[in-house]
């Protein structure tokens, strides 16, 4: 199947026809629907034609209800499943069995165990001891994060913050041109255009010059932006490319546990992350929802080692061949840039790879321990009661809590969900701003000029529960002043939402209540 797309390059916009084959995705969706419908139909037929089979169905439904109630999941996630199981006969508990358990597959778990034996084993006891001496509270936060995410605390790492995607784009190109040994890229979305084509031209040139290049892109994230077999195209250029969790049409967790990560590593010396995917709207070459506000961060120094580790773990998780020995990337002397600030690059993801909610825990701790202010910027605001209470409690305690969301949404139903939290938060004293020029895609959290998180983590269920994510936690790093300046400038361009200006009619309350009840399942 052919598809005509618009390519933006140095010569301007032009049309290009590509071999775009969404058939694989369509077949996968049909297989999931067929598999689900078949199981439900068989169960119903058994109830009709097998005596007393309905007793087994009732027993199964009771079992499902008890299992949901006794699970360790958040109550906000349990309630929709309980409603579905109780209100939709047969289909409810069958859908529960097929889709509720969003854990990784046995094959993935086997590969993860193999990966764990080859991860970096950095001794950061010295830097942890130094932080404990400097500030015990900060030490406890860093130690918690390191234990939750199996990561490490670093110093000697410079950082540069970019308040718009186009600024990040320019910096990336310069660093890519200077690559000498290897380039690693992992992105949720990659789309042909000025952004990706500019990078791809450099990657081809570097491969020809002997530089090792590896690329990971999410299969579902790129469903509408790349041909279904694009990894083969990249491999033809000499690039080692893989899809993250290739869609196969199985009625389980295929549409969850996606890689929402954005990582670029160059020679183990320079690393990038943030909210920016590799598509032209992220650098405002293509306008979709007004001005696209996104941010990124560039690391140079010791902490880049951890971004390298996160990337390689994801690469190993998705290749069919036996796990390569990547220890060579960790044996070389760590590249160091003098800086006294503390940095922890970390990953987050589904259970059991991550037994606890890493990003959610760190955001809640930021709120719980703040004494002056907490600023947050996220494209979505779809949170559970626990996190919502943490935000409320900080504001009620007297902390200046501010949240920046888009004024022009990319998904209307998600925007309705986001707005469903406004009144509750406003009543607690939280200040909410909608970015008037367009869409905010940045994921930034800042507290008291001391703590900050920049990465890929949205304030929604997908980011906080289901997806593979990554972020940079910082303490007393000089880059935090740049983050604060950007937050203030963004607020100046935003509309402050108040109880007087927020329209909350009976009809809108009903719609928001309905979509919010279903939000944990989406």
Image: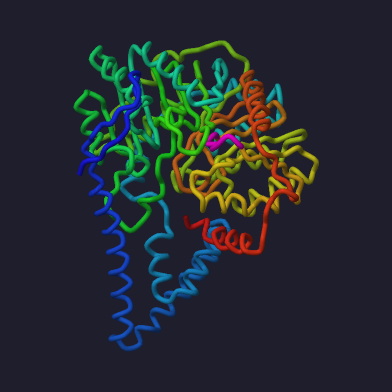
**189 or 384, which lies in front?**
189
| In magenta segment, residue 439 | yes
Q: Is residue 448 above or below residue 88?
A: above
From which residue to which does the magenta span run? 436-442
Q: In the figure, 153 relative to 433: above or below?
A: above
505 or 163: nearer the viewer: 505
Across and down, in percent, residue 238 comes to: 22, 23
Residue 328 can be seen, yes or no: no
Quick check: is 317 in the magenta stretch? no
- In percent of the image, x 21 and y 24: which residue is there? 237
Quarter location, residue 246: top left
Quadrant of the image occupied by residue 376: top right
Q: Quadrant of the N terminus?
A: top left
Quick one: 212 or 406, which is closer to the camera? 406
Q: Specify the farthest residue to the bottom.
A: 51
Please provide percent x and percent y for residue 483.
62, 25
Position of 382 compared to 309: left or right? right
Q: Is residue 463 visible?
A: yes
Question: Taking 196 as reference, is 391 left or right?
Answer: right
User: Where is residue 332 shown, x and y percent of the image?
Assistant: 39, 15
């Amino acid at each position: 199947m052919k598809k005509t797309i618009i390519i933006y390059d140095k010569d301007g916009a032009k049309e290009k026809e590509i071999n775009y084959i969404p058939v694989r995705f369509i077949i996968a969706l049909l297989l999931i629907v067929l598999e689900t419908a078949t199981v439900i139909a068989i169960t119903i037929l058994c109830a009709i034609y097998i005596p007393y089979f309905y007793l087994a169905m009732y027993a199964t439904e009771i079992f499902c209800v008890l299992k949901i109630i006794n699970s360790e999941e958040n109550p906000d996630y349990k309630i929709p499943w309980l409603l579905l199981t109780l209100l939709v006969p047969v289909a409810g508990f069958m859908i529960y069995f097929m889709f509720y358990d969003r854990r990784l597959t046995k094959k993935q778990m086997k590969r993860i165990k193999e990966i764990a034996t080859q991860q970096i084993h950095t001794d950061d006891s010295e830097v942890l001891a130094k932080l404990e001496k400097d500030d015990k509270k900060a030490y406890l936060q860093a130690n918690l994060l390191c234990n939750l995410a199996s990561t490490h605390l670093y110093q000697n790492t410079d950082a540069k913050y970019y308040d718009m995607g186009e600024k990040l784009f320019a910096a990336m190109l310069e660093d890519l041109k200077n690559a000498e040994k290897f380039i690693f890229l992992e992105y949720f979305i990659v789309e042909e255009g000025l952004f990706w084509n500019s990078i791809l031209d450099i990657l081809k040139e570097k491969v020809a010059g002997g530089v090792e290049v590896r690329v990971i892109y999410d299969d579902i994230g790129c469903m509408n932006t790349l041909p279904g077999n694009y990894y083969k195209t990249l491999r033809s250029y000499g690039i080692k490319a893989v899809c993250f969790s290739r869609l196969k049409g199985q009625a389980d967790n295929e549409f969850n546990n996606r890689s929402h990560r954005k990582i670029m590593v160059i020679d183990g010396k320079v690393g990038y992350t943030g909210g920016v995917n590799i598509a032209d709207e992220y650098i405002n070459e293509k306008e979709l929802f007004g001005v696209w506000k996104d941010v990124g961060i560039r690391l140079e120094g010791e902490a880049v080692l951890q971004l390298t580790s996160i990337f390689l773990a994801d690469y190993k998780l998705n290749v069919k061949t036996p796990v390569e020995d990547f220890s060579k990337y960790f044996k070389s002397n760590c590249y160091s840039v003098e800086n006294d600030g503390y940095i922890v690059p970390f990953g987050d993801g589904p259970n059991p790879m991550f037994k606890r909610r890493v990003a959610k825990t760190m955001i809640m701790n930021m709120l719980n321990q703040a004494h002056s202010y907490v600023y947050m910027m996220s494209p979505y605001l779809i949170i559970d009661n626990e996190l919502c209470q943490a935000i409320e409690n900080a504001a009620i305690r007297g902390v200046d809590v501010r949240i920046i969301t888009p004024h022009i949404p990319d998904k209307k139903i998600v925007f309705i969900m986001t707005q469903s939290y406004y009144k509750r938060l406003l009543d607690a004293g939280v200040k909410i701003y909608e970015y008037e020029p367009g869409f905010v895609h940045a994921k930034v959290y800042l507290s008291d000029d001391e703590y900050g998180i920049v990465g890929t983590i949205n304030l929604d269920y997908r980011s906080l529960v289901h997806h593979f994510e990554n972020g940079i936690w910082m303490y007393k790093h000089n880059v935090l002043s740049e983050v604060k300046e950007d937050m203030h400038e963004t607020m100046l361009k935003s509309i402050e939402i108040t109880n007087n200006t927020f329209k909350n009619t009976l009809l809108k309350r009903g719609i928001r209540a309905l979509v919010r009840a279903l939000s944990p399942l989406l």
